[in-house]
Image (cartoon, rainbow, N blue to C red):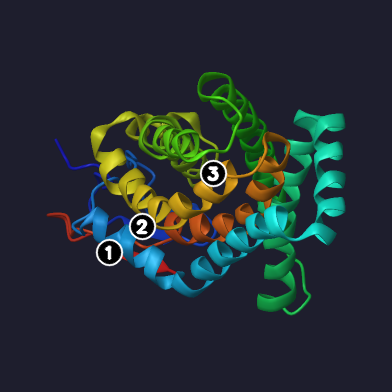
Amino acid sequence: MEPAGRLVAPEARILLSHREGRIGFAGASRCHYRPRTVSSGNPFSAGFRAARANLIPGLVIQALMVAVVLAYYFCAPARGWFQTLAAAKAQWGYAFSFISSVIAGAVLPVFLTIIVVRRGRATRADFASLLFLSAFWGVDGAIIDGFYRLQAVVFGAHPDFRTVAMKVLVDQLLYNPLFAAPNTMACFEFRKQGYHPGRMRHVFTAEFYRVQVVPALCATWAVWIPVTTAIYALPSLLQIPLFALALSFWSLLIRYITSRPQTQERSPARLEHVARE
């Protein structure tokens, strides 16, 4: 059996576009496609590279989280702003989580891409990206809200050292590796495969977890262990607003990981691999 990620046909040419998440075929009408999950690189190294590449933004967002927590506890003039956010969260509930996550995880990153990278010129791909990211991060924000509520029921809502520590450990060592990271990488892989369900079998394999999820976990722990500590140090009604603030950075980091090129292997038929960045 041929390794995953190869086209079993002579003299086929694979055109891979990591940026757009599309795969095109030239002269491969009789080919059988198998999604790529094989990488010769170290998945831990890939995750550390992603975190290192975003070291400065990561430190900035972590410092910002700490500053917000300190402002809540020690800056009296800021209390009115926090009370307004808490009241909005209490009134709108999951709708607040959904909308704030869409703004932080979809609208801001796409808007910055259009302004900074494309110099104000929006493309069709930008609108497609906005739709996907809005759906993904909106639902994810609502799920996170439910998870935070569950944590408050199990461990309590008082932000003492033991309660915060237990919430961070469950968040990063159970919820993240068992659900959050695999779900995130699977959703982005679904997009990369053109929303084609038939190309998603490889997602449910240990190889996909090693190649895609492990790097995401490494980058997650580097950024989100300090961030979640700050989030759980605030009252429950302020945790989602702080999460949305951190999400604006995290969505950019996830896009970096999911778009990184993988090392390709040459098949016996000397298939030509052309990776377009």
| Quarter occupied by residue 69 | bottom right
* Residue, disc 3: 191
* Residue, disc 2: 14
User: Does residue 40 show up?
Assistant: yes
Lateral position of residue 123 relative to residue 205, left or right: right
In the image, what residue occupies the spot 35% across and 36% down?
A: 173
1 and 2 marks in contact (CB < 8 Å):
yes
Lateral position of residue 157 relative to residue 99, left or right: left
Say which of 87 and 38 sits in front: 87
Percent position of residue 32, x then y: 32, 38
In the image, what residue occupies the spot 24% across and 44% down?
A: 8
Lateral position of residue 190 relative to residue 123, left or right: left
Of helix, strand and loop, which one carries label 3?
helix
For marks 1 and 3, give the CA distance. Answer: 24 Å
For marks 1 and 2, give the CA distance. Answer: 6 Å
Lateral position of residue 168 relative to residue 28, left or right: right
Q: Amino acid at mark 3?
A: Arg
For marks 2 and 3, give the CA distance. Answer: 18 Å
